Image (spheres, rainbow, N blue to C red):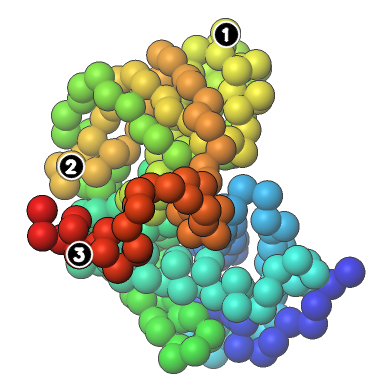
């Protein structure tokens, strides 16, 4: 079962070429990086088991600039219309932050930052692009522009500045293990709101699969950027943590020790405690 897509649940990608003809390879590469970025932000912003969105082109105009409007192909029944704003606003906000400083934005991973850099590599005489901008059509039509400064900051944001043995705690997500390569995963860190890339040993594959979707603490060589943000982890150990429980409801402990005040009334007991 699916839900109809609202017209404002969309992202506009604007590409300004340097000539009247936009190179087809450049066009498809930029759109590909945007689509994958939206998918990655969506995975980091929303719980692991949330149904995911597939993106489609709703409209395209080619005048001086090329304007493409991307919308979810369908909205799964278990996804609220409000939740579509997470990847849209998260991606645009992230591009804006990277344009201002070399920091990994909230809901971004190292890979997503690199994708913004790949979009920007086409800017300039050699790439055939004057400018690329993205606009979230959800709410106030917020726009962010990818420029040469964005590319520089994206490169610096994922450049390891220091390494030390440490750990990362969060939810394990996005497992991949290609033949001949080390298994990889992402850990969504709730404290920083971005995903940390984890590279493990081949004998950790089964351990990672069993821990998918669980809260874990992964230890190893942790790399940080010049801002002190975690970039990646070369994992040596993984521990699955107990499922998180929210704050206890007062009703759960009501009456657990009816004689705690002794022979005093509640008011007398509180007065005694406060005057102690």
Seen from the viewer's position, the closer of residues 52 and 258 is 258
Spot occupied by residue 24 in the image (x, y as percentages of width and height): 59, 63
Kindly identify which numbered label has been placed on residue 228. 2
Say few, some or many: other residues with alpha carbon within 10 Å of mark 1 (under 14 / 14 to 19 / 20 or more): few
In the image, is 44 to the left or to the right of 162?
A: right
In the image, is 158 to the left or to the right of 140?
A: left
Q: Quadrant of residue 50?
A: bottom right
Residue on which disc 1 sits? 203
Q: Secondary structure at mark 2?
A: loop
User: Can residue 36 be seen?
Assistant: no
Q: Identify the residue at image location x=24%, y=54%.
A: 103
Q: Secondary structure at mark 1?
A: helix
Q: Quadrant of the N terminus?
A: bottom right
Spot occupied by residue 154 in the image (x, y as percentages of width and height): 29, 53
Residue on which disc 3 sits? 271
Q: Nearer the viewer, mark 1 or mark 3?
A: 3
């Amino acid at each position: 079962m699916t839900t109809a897509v609202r017209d404002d649940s969309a992202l506009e990608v604007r590409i300004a070429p340097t000539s009247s003809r936009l190179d087809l390879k450049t066009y498809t590469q930029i759109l590909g990086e945007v689509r994958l970025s939206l998918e990655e932000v969506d995975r980091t912003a929303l719980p692991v088991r949330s149904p995911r969105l597939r993106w489609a082109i709703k409209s395209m105009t080619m005048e001086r600039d090329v304007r493409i409007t991307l919308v979810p192909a369908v909205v799964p029944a278990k996804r609220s219309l409000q939740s579509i704003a997470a990847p849209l606003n998260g991606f645009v906000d992230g591009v804006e932050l990277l344009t201002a400083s070399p920091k990994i934005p909230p809901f971004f991973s190292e890979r997503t930052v690199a994708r913004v850099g790949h979009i920007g590599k086409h800017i300039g005489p050699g790439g055939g692009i004057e400018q690329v901008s993205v606009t979230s059509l959800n709410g106030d039509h917020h726009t962010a522009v990818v420029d040469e400064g964005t590319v520089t900051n994206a490169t610096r944001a994922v450049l390891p500045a220091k390494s030390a043995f440490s750990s990362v705690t969060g939810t394990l997500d996005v497992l991949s293990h290609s033949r001949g390569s080390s298994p990889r995963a992402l850990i969504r860190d709730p404290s920083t709101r971005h995903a940390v890339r984890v590279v493990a040993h081949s004998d950790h594959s089964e351990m990672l699969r069993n821990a998918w979707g669980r809260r874990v603490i992964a230890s190893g060589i942790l790399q940080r950027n010049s801002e002190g943000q975690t970039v990646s982890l070369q994992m040596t150990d993984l521990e699955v943590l107990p499922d998180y429980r929210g704050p206890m409801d007062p009703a759960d402990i009501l009456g657990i020790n009816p004689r705690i005040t002794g022979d005093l009334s509640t008011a007398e007991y509180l007065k005694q405690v406060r005057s102690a």
